[in-house]
Image (cartoon, rainbow, N blue to C red):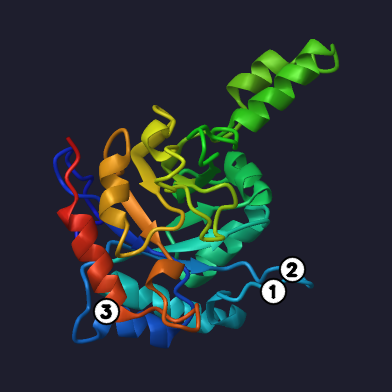
Amino acid sequence: SSSSSSPSVESSPLVKICGVSSLACASNILEGPKSPNIDFMGMILWPGTADKPCKRYCANGNMDEVAKMVDLAKQKDVTPVGVFVDEDADTIMQVANQVGLEWVQLHGDGARAALRKLPMKLKVIYVMATDPQTGKLTTPKPGEDAVEDRKKSYDAGKNPMAAVDFISAGRRVVDYVLIDGPSPGSGESAVDAKSGGLAKLQVPRGCSRKGWILAGGLAPDNVQTAIETCPFMPNVVDVSSGVCTSDGITKDADKVSAFVSAATNAMVA
């Protein structure tokens, strides 16, 4: 696996499998006879809401099992990533420390807002939504919400220290931006070939250390075309439902292998 090094421009994207929900599922992907060469393994550490529980909530919140999954991934040279949606910075840090995570994915408004309070030692994947028709981003860039809040406060005369606050607004640096469809995590596509949005995708430059991740509706049968349609090569491609068995939760090792092969075959001019 090459998760420890940044890919060159010519190389194919790294692969992130998200929504791995149990130790058995992780073992099947990482230790099975066909264990494909993946780079990142995402685990959803958000339980969902009372009226809509998260069906891929990792190990149903059993943090001992999550910690074992994290250890297994590291043994296999795969980077484990904890996915958070509405948690605050303290909760994200506490869970990451508890299970041994160095990477977190900030998926919803609450978790994205926590960015400014997260320590730099935590590597961050920052999720942004797009309009599949136009390719335009519909989520503020990392730290932009904090900056806007301070500017409004300063303009209204409410906070004479806003200029100083702007400089010390907290962390704004992320490691990857993840570009998803209009409802990130739903499997709704950012890659709708018919709409043409993918070719116009407005990938933000300069706000991530390692580049960008393409997600949203990817599967073994469309990932190569999706990569080749992008205005420039994604550094990582991310898949969840596109490599599941019929239950929509468990990962299918054959589909994962097919996804990795298709992503590796992609060529971007």
Neighbor class of circle 3 (other Cα within 10 Å; few <14, some 14-19, many 20+) is: some
Quadrant of the rendering where the N terminus is positioned:
bottom left
Spatial CA span between label 2 and label 3: 32 Å
Q: Which mark is residue 49?
A: 2
Question: Can you identify the residue that label 3 sits on?
Answer: 254
Is 51 left or right of 231, judged from the image as shown? right
Looking at the image, residue 168 lies above or below residue 269: above
- Compared with 51, 250 (above or below) is below
Q: Amino acid at mark 3?
A: Asp
Residue depicted at x 51% and y 42%: 132
For label 1, the residue is 53
| Gap in angstroms between the C-alphas marked 3 and 1 | 28 Å
Give the structural element (helix, strand or loop) at label 3: helix
**Dot 2: what SS?**
loop
Question: Which of the numbered marks, if any, corresponds to residue 123?
Answer: none
| Amino acid type, callout 2 | Thr
The answer to whether 182 is drawn above or below residue 53 in the figure is above
Q: Residue at the spot x=38%, y=47% of the render?
A: 213
Residue 229 location, quadrant: top left
Q: Can residue 55 be seen at all in this image of the molecule? A: yes
> Residue at the spot x=52%, y=48% of the render?
181
Find residue 17 and report its horizontal and vertical position in percent. Answer: 37, 66
